[in-house]
Image: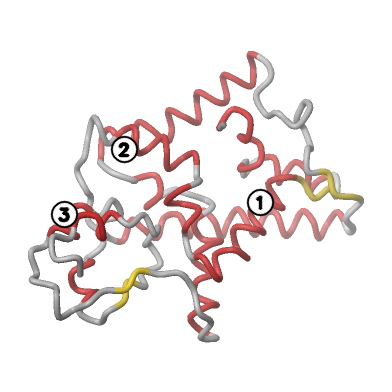
Amino acid sequence: MFPVTLYYFSPALIISSAFHGIINGSFIIFTLQFLLSIPFGRLFCGYICPAGGIQECAFLINDKIPKQNRKNYIKYGVWLIWISVIIIIYAKTGKIEYIDFFYETENGISVTNIYSYIIYYGIVLIIFIPCVIFGKRVFCRYFCWMAPFMVIGIKIRNIISLPGLHIIGDNEKCVSCGKCNQKCPMGLNIEEMIKTKEVKSMECIQCGVCIDECPQKA
């Protein structure tokens, strides 16, 4: 479905629509990602995101799991600059003219001509190639412009102590075999978090691989 939905995840099209005082499809999708992350965390990343699907295809070539490090913060810097530009443009526009969910699409479909396919395959390669070179979910970790929306939602949930979807564990069953750590596509230290009985990392995408891999069903 990525060729159909491409423009609804576009970080560029929302800027274009802001110049015209329009709330477009990607504006609405990003807002929903933020709001739905409060109860559901980063479920979108684990099960729905087309960029996640592209990266999982790369697992067949390189299944190395990079460790969490300071590079994880690159995406927040990118997001902060990008979101600041959007706010400034809407502020200078002065008003919102109307909502057009299908802005710049033909019959609601994103990729409908040769030029669009050039953009589409370029984006696919930008997502796919880093994962082939550096390992699992590298794009999610370092560059994804959508992840910060969901991270902020999870932080708000934690601050005001709302219930929300997350992985829990039984630390009495855990035998510290490390299989959860070895398989987590986001490189999280699941074994350490299970000692506190909950996996509440902002980088957890709720994929459940750690659950599937645990021989003790902890």
Is there a contact, CB below 8 Å, between mark 1 and mark 2? Answer: no
Separation (CA) of disc 2 from disc 3: 17 Å
Q: Which mark is residue 131?
A: 2
Residue 65 placed where, x, y %? Answer: 22, 48
Q: Which residue is mark 1?
A: 29
- Please name whichever residue, 63 or 143, is drawn nearer the observer in this view of the structure: 63
Q: Which residue is mark 3?
A: 182
Q: Amino acid type of disc 3?
A: Gln
Q: Nearer the viewer, mark 2 or mark 3?
A: 3
Q: Residue furthest top?
A: 114
Is there a contact, CB below 8 Å, between mark 1 and mark 3? Answer: no
For marks 2 and 3, the one nearer the N-term is 2
Q: Nearer the viewer, mark 1 or mark 2?
A: 1
- Please name whichever residue, 69 or 162, is drawn nearer the observer in this view of the structure: 162
Q: Is residue 195 above or below residue 51?
A: below
Q: Amino acid type of disc 2?
A: Cys
Could you say whether the residue bearing mark 2 is in a helix, strand or loop?
helix
Q: Residue at x 18, y 69 (%)?
A: 191
Q: Residue at x 52, y 62 (%)?
A: 150
Could you say whether the residue bearing mark 1 is in a helix, strand or loop?
helix
Position of 97 with respect to 205 (left or right) is right
Local crowd size for mark 3, using a 10 Å CA cut-off: few (<14), some (14–19), many (≥20):
some
Residue 207 placed where, x, y %? Answer: 36, 54
Local crowd size for mark 2, using a 10 Å CA cut-off: few (<14), some (14–19), many (≥20):
many
- Please name whichever residue, 106 or 81, is drawn nearer the observer in this view of the structure: 106
Looking at the rendered image, the quarter that the C terminus falls into is bottom left
For marks 1 and 3, the one nearer the N-term is 1
Residue 21 placed where, x, y %? Answer: 85, 50
Q: Is residue 157 above or below residue 57?
A: below
